[in-house]
Amino acid sequence: MKKILLLQWLLLPIILFSQKIDSINVHTLKNVSVIGFKTVRGIGHMPDFKDGIIYAGKKSEVIMVDSLDANKAINNTRQILGRIPGLNIVETETGGFTANGIATRGLNPIQSIEMNTRQNGYNISADIYGYNEAYYLPPMEAVQRIEMVRGAAALQFGAQFGGLVNYITKDAPANKPFEFYTSQTAGSYGLFNSFNSIGGNFKKLSYYAFIQYRYMDGYRPNSKQWQLSGFGKLQYKISEKLNVTAEYSLLRNTIQMPGGLTDSQFQANPKMSTRSRNWLKTPWNIVNVSMNYSLSKNSIISIKSTYLYGNRSLVWRNEDGGPAAQDTIDPITNTYVPREVGIQNMKNITTEFRFSHQYQFVHQQATISGGIRHSYAWLKRLGGGEGTTNSDFDLSIRGDWGYNLNFTTTNIAPFIENIFKFGDKLSIIPGFRFEYLNSTATGYKTTNGTKQNVLENRSRTFPLFGMGISYKTGTYTNIYGNISQAYRPIEYSQLEPFGITSRIDPNLKDSYGFNADLGYRGTIKNYFNFDLGVFYLAYNNRIGVLVQTDPNTGMEYSVRKNIANSVHKGVENYLEFNILKYLNAQSKTGLSIFNSFAFIDARYTTGEFKGNRVEAAAKTINRTGIIFNNPHFSATFQINNIGDAYGDASNVKTSTDPIAGYIPGYTVADLSMTYTIKKIAIKVGVNNLTDKSYFTRRTDEYPGPGIIPSIGRSYYFGFSTQF
């Protein structure tokens, strides 16, 4: 780790020197500035201000997806997002979850619960406050770019510690009434993916739509899955100042889950399946209507209203007994044991109003950006129902549900930020967000034959402050810094009873803390891209379960309460150097090397596990690659070296608890190539080139319990064309 950091920081004088000696030609940026972003071979950072939103002073990345060589047919996250330093990826998509989760800075990556996940600027998770799980993501073949903003995004977008990830879908082609694009991909383990899109313009109306079908037999037995994704977008330009847009996204799928493994099972055969009767469906629907209006050349207002309705239906041989429990036919009854059924219905409606205005302040242009967000979310959770002894997808139950719960969240959040410029180089960006949150829980849960009624109603407010700074050291380089407060609301599951004698602390509080960044970033001509930074994240009032003794009875009981604080600190560095462009700026051939490196020290600072590492937090995340490209051919070879981690806060290496235990570090290599002739592109690649056996997650629930293995060596081949 020290050698990597030393090499990166030794390059700084070279960067500065190169910038000075080439200052005469610094405006020559062919193939670097793409729709307002400064990028080198597809990765860069957000501009100070775009589409009414302030990004100045914030650590950010933007990835142009079309420029990447990657297996987009299966949304291979480590290839598509892997160049973002410090990104922790949990690879469970083929094990039962519908999307590979991500996180930054040692936070929990499961289903991206610490992130504010959006598509085209609106939320696509069930409820970012009570149930922030992302079951739907757009297929990467439909995505134009991916925007990521670290913890400072809490002020503009919401309170998540991990920050924002925003998937921007493609637009209608310019100046064409109709265009058809198709991409067909086949690969290992029965992969077939078909992506087709249409788009065009007719006078003031533009349209874009896609449909994707994907089927896989799966890496392990009993892991077949299919999914259908669709999207439609209509935009009408009423005038030069006003346009309205309507969008609809859908997901339909069926996933068979092969179960989790014990450590010994994984060592013996990581392709083993312990379950053949576990199934999951997550139909998802998102409707969005938005309006953008330019009041003047300096003033913009926008409104986005979104309605989401989704479902998660699950039938499985539950976690009782852990991964070692066999799911076999009982010789006495000659049947399997009954499965457990769980159904969740989710709805939310959100409206976000934004305004921005550029004005003069002390003879300098200042920018103010603000707005208000209102959302109401409802979740119906049915579970613990005794299902059939069958093996197919069957949600019928016998008797009553084990629990029947209703949760709601109401959120109102005004926010504002302002860029104050002092001279041509220095900008100060103060910001404020005020969050009102009301959470309710009603219903019942039966534990060991005893029905416990649930009645919770909690209202609270959170003032969140932030301050950013940006200092331009050159035309395309700057020093940035930011400190912003954030919080993590109490989740729905943390309001559920979890035992007859167990209790929920009436003073249970939301987790809170802050993110701080300091870095130096920029691009040098069309051959060098860099972002060198440090961070500090304080995460207080983490929620967990402790065993306590009742002073009146002397009896022990479990209580869910705030148990500990944690601190996450480290470095996040990215370097990319195009050797051939450096030697000849006009060269049509490029040869780049890149390194995305993070060192993360995430530890508990109070509580029972003080000094222990935070669960799932790898200390080092190092991805290195080489990219070759010319007008017809491109190839990317990437090596991913991820450090070890632990499944829970106890940091034990082995345990009978399926979530606890060691997660070894691993190294995985990927190779992807694209050959283009006229309008036809041929794509081939190999993922996990060395067939490494590894895993990124332990779980105590579905799709386990136990270890969820990642995929071994796999190949893919595809072609695309457009008319």
Image (cartoon, rainbow, N blue to C red):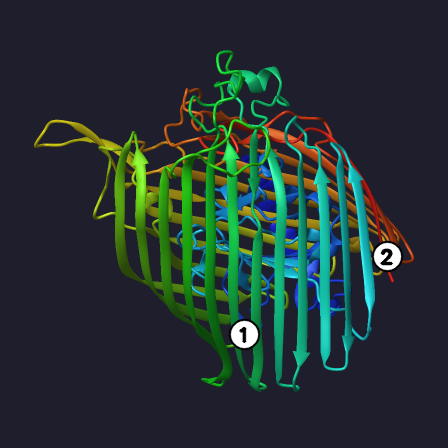
Residue 159 visible in the displayed image: no
Amino acid of disc 1:
Gly
Q: Is residue 439 left or right of residue 420?
A: left
The x, y position of residue 629, in whole percent, is 82, 50
User: On screen, 169 above or below 282?
Assistant: below
Seen at 29% across and 40% down, the residue is 497
- The residue pinned by badge 1 equals 52
The x, y position of residue 686, in whole percent, is 76, 35
The x, y position of residue 238, in whole percent, is 65, 85
Q: Which mark is residue 588?
A: 2
Viewport quadrant of the N terminus: top right
In terms of depth relative to the viewer, which is nearer, 200 or 62?
A: 200
Going from the N terminus, do you reach mark 2 or mark 1 first? 1
Within the image, what quadrant is residue 547 found in? top left
In terms of depth relative to the viewer, which is nearer, 218 or 655?
A: 218
> Marks 2 and 1, how far apart in space?
36 Å
